[in-house]
Image: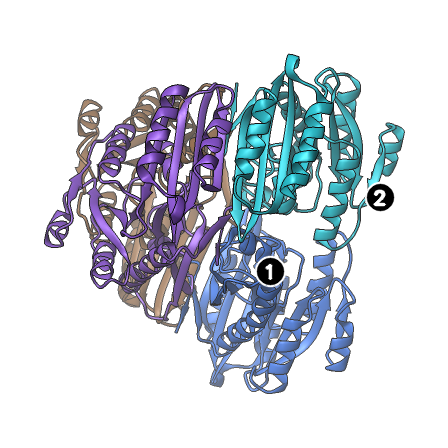
Chain colours: A cyan, B brown, C blue, D purple
Amino acid sequence: MKYYATITVIGRDKTGVVARVTNYLFEQKANIEELEEQVTRGQFSMTLQASWPSAFWDFERISSGLVKLAQELAMEIKFRTHDPKQLQRAAILVTKEPHCLQGLLTAFGARQLKAQPTVIISNRKDLESIARKNKVPFELVDKADRSEAEKEVLAVLERHGIDFVILARYMRILSPNFVWRYKNKIINIHPSLLPSFPGAQAYRQAYERGVKIVGVTAHFVTMNLDEGPIIAQDSFHVKPNMTLKDIVARGQELETRVLVQAVKLYLAKRLDVYWGVVKQV
Amino acid sequence: MKYYATITVIGRDKTGVVARVTNYLFEQKANIEELEEQVTRGQFSMTLQASWPSAFWDFERISSGLVKLAQELAMEIKFRTHDPKQLQRAAILVTKEPHCLQGLLTAFGARQLKAQPTVIISNRKDLESIARKNKVPFELVDKADRSEAEKEVLAVLERHGIDFVILARYMRILSPNFVWRYKNKIINIHPSLLPSFPGAQAYRQAYERGVKIVGVTAHFVTMNLDEGPIIAQDSFHVKPNMTLKDIVARGQELETRVLVQAVKLYLAKRLDVYWGVVKQV
Amino acid sequence: MKYYATITVIGRDKTGVVARVTNYLFEQKANIEELEEQVTRGQFSMTLQASWPSAFWDFERISSGLVKLAQELAMEIKFRTHDPKQLQRAAILVTKEPHCLQGLLTAFGARQLKAQPTVIISNRKDLESIARKNKVPFELVDKADRSEAEKEVLAVLERHGIDFVILARYMRILSPNFVWRYKNKIINIHPSLLPSFPGAQAYRQAYERGVKIVGVTAHFVTMNLDEGPIIAQDSFHVKPNMTLKDIVARGQELETRVLVQAVKLYLAKRLDVYWGVVKQV
Amino acid sequence: MKYYATITVIGRDKTGVVARVTNYLFEQKANIEELEEQVTRGQFSMTLQASWPSAFWDFERISSGLVKLAQELAMEIKFRTHDPKQLQRAAILVTKEPHCLQGLLTAFGARQLKAQPTVIISNRKDLESIARKNKVPFELVDKADRSEAEKEVLAVLERHGIDFVILARYMRILSPNFVWRYKNKIINIHPSLLPSFPGAQAYRQAYERGVKIVGVTAHFVTMNLDEGPIIAQDSFHVKPNMTLKDIVARGQELETRVLVQAVKLYLAKRLDVYWGVVKQV
């Protein structure tokens, strides 16, 4: 069994930070699976994924070492992990459409998805009752200012010890600053066969364009809207007399199914993101 | 049984041309199914589709009436038709990939496609031997200048009395001036699920983007490259270990099948193009 | 001086309608500048632009002749025209952003745009006060159902005898059924250099993509969202320290200017739409 | 004065590689400005940019230390650097259009671009005479197989000690495997205002779409074709009577100018690539 953690380091640049952090992790027997660092206008930012064989894992020791290191470097270090004997903790972000949220909660309930739906976050109240019925905490974050809203969402994720994020028809765009902190840990469902029909009103776009195959895409969220690595897609043929309403109905069924499938692949650790492309392993 | 004809009228604008032509057709008992006319910088151009109940059809009479009308109006009038008791005459335009051409010839041969493959036109010699083996005349039009090459292709189509055109992986772009004369009578196959991946190298684009569903599109050719009304699409799932080569192989099978299917729908007169969208009727 | 009219004919298909209408117009000495007709599933629809030398123009006679013809054919015929000695009548559709509306009203007021701002239509109340201050009738059409809302907008246009429509940051999508009736008579402003960044949030898309040139596009509205013939574009360089807010501010100035310029070109009859492309003449 | 180097490390994954390498660089007083590492299917790959204050720079010592480290880790480590007292060494990749190549060579010759044009690489012979006239070595790499051709190009770059690469209308697509090794060190010029009109035939696409502003884009090359971070763009208005030929002529002038400008910004170290966006500093 392996233990996994995500570490982010942010602060004013100084020499040796990468070496100090990776050296510390090496002493702690971690393997660094992925690392991205850059210095921009004197600002240092780094995010890395590390793993430990269970024999070397000691949360308290690693964690307190990082706290000490953060003080020495005068930088912010976040250490997010979860006990592999426990379920990963998922946040579900929604707006007003219920179908994906309900599909996910059903799949979690049936142990089809082996993770813990820990909190539901929304910019509207519409789906609060579903959250309540399923006994998942609901948090309303409806600030109009995107930057402030995101800070609040980040705080909610932190408070709930969230491991990964599912966007289940969440209708706000996440900024690079948000996405960076959950690299390849935010899964979105988009109602088209990307790269066709990005943006809003995807079914209507497809319908008015007259395509004969309509589909949906689950993907990791990156800096560029609707351009992240594709995890799963599925599609159906448009029959001659289907209306837009029929297409939306079929599409929404598919959204739920493909989103659940993508989360399942993610939880099975069967996904590798390699130069912007998801390889199933 | 109905008789169909396409009539194009081109020349210096003068008052009453639309009325004169449509009036003449009305006297000849034609029904005008579609008409598009415009005057631009003093240049008049009109294309129309007309149909006749067989009782009123008399090719010689209608045709010689149009010749007389053209003289009176001092305009060019083309009258393209075919005897519904005979097969429609298809031109197939190709470049160097053989699979679609071969699939079409097989389907024509098996009477799966009820039309006459009348001429194969190419900008290269690669597929001449296939044409010869199938006893279909082959015409090489390899002028570098697009405008001159198109004039020559138009002359070949005229000479062979072509009713409709199939682009079977033809690698040159047709100009508006060409396309206009065969409105909704040119069928192309494009190796992607349009509107994704227009332009060249579509399979490579799809592969490098990491999509999980790859497909192909048969569409009518319009003024805008890869944007014409979609007739048929089909797709397959990309399995985790498929290489680009595997995708191209699967895709080419699909190209042939979808192109044959689109031609079949076209010949069955089951297609209506309505505001840029194909409705199957 | 010339008189112009738009005529639309809709109804169950029957033989001879095109000939009857164009023949009538020929007798009335009209020149048909553009005509588009099609029969789909037994439904006949035709829109045409005609012009008359002033010597032959007699509104009452032409109009009553068309009313009679409509009865004979049992079809709906609409005859929209305006006296060239009078100003064209513009409808301005808006949602909540005031800058384009205000720029247009200023340009109309200063006789920079020689047309009559006849009605302002909106799906929200935000800009009602601007309408009132400028003494232009304001009509709220806020039905949620698109099809019903459009019927109501069409009725308002009819009631006000509107010649052409300006979309001044109108945030609803018009259906083909609406657009068809005002072919090349609906002008929209889109906040990007189309075809880049169609759809919503165009400035944000441009900003997050990091383009170094941002611009705006005035275009005729067609069936396909943000794909109509481009009338005018303008752009500016993104300076190194510009924020999204700066870009939006500069962009909105440009929107106003380019929209006014496009309307001016339209009113000067200096635009020809030819195979989907605007030619300035 | 600062010394810069790019280090790439490739091999079978093992624990501690990141720490070992970054630690070594820390001991050597390097600052790590950017680092990207990932492990995929047991394959470790890392690319990093490091800088040294001149006081601590000792090429021989650092280099031989890395050679030793490579042996210990049993991995391939490449160390590419240049003496800041010397000019950076540029490779120019071309196909057959001469204008950008000539513009670059003129700018290099006039010391407007302070770098050394070290080698010209092409998949065709067309421009060999220009290379010869300017006394820059010319290397023909015309293998049809992309993967083999790239290996050969990489070998040429290595042999010439190339610091950065300019694609001056190079008509072949570079694979992720190539691009990764020269992250943010390959500059391309594309003949459109990206993201409009990616792919081939960009001017024709723009012309047939009828845009009123045409432009060009210099960008860093990334894994995704025509989607890399934009360095510079410029544009011009399409005048009413411009032909496609006129547009191409104006565009090619602009290509040359914008490519030279982008290389100048690059050499002035005024570019930061931040989450896929170039910030000028």
- The nearer-to-camera label among 1 and 2 is 1
Q: Mark 1 lies on which chain?
A: C
Taking the spot 36% from the left edge, 61% from the top edge, the residue there is B45
Q: Which amino acid does label 1 sit on?
A: Leu
Q: Is residue A261 left or right of residue D120?
A: right
**Residue under label 1:** C244
Taking the spot 80% from the left edge, 20% from the top edge, the residue there is A109
Q: Is residue A166 left or right of residue A37?
A: right
Q: In this view, does D41 lie to the left or right of A251?
A: left
Q: Are marks 1 and 2 in contact (CB under 8 Å)?
A: no
Q: How many marks?
A: 2
Picture coordinates of residue A192, whole percent (x, y): 59, 37
Q: In this view, does C280 lie above or below C212?
A: below
**Quadrant for the N terminus of chain D in the image:** bottom left
Nearer to me, D87 or B272:
D87
Q: Which chain carries label 2?
A: A
**Residue under label 2:** A125
Picture coordinates of residue D148, whole percent (x, y): 26, 28
Q: Is residue B244 above or below residue C274?
A: above
Element marked by disc 1 = helix
Q: Is residue C173 left or right of residue B20?
A: right
Looking at the rendered structure, whether the residues under marks 1 and 2 are on a common chain is answered as no
Element marked by disc 2 = loop
Q: In this view, does B32 lie above or below A220?
A: below
Picture coordinates of residue C262, whole percent (x, y): 51, 72
Residue B192, image quadrant: top left
Taking the spot 77% from the left edge, 46% from the top edge, the residue there is A152
Q: Can residue A274 be seen in this view?
A: no
Picture coordinates of residue B105, whole percent (x, y): 30, 25
Report, in whole angstroms, how far the alpha carbon at label 1 lies from the one at label 2: 29 Å
Q: Residues within 10 Å of mark 1 (few under 14, many from 20)?
A: some
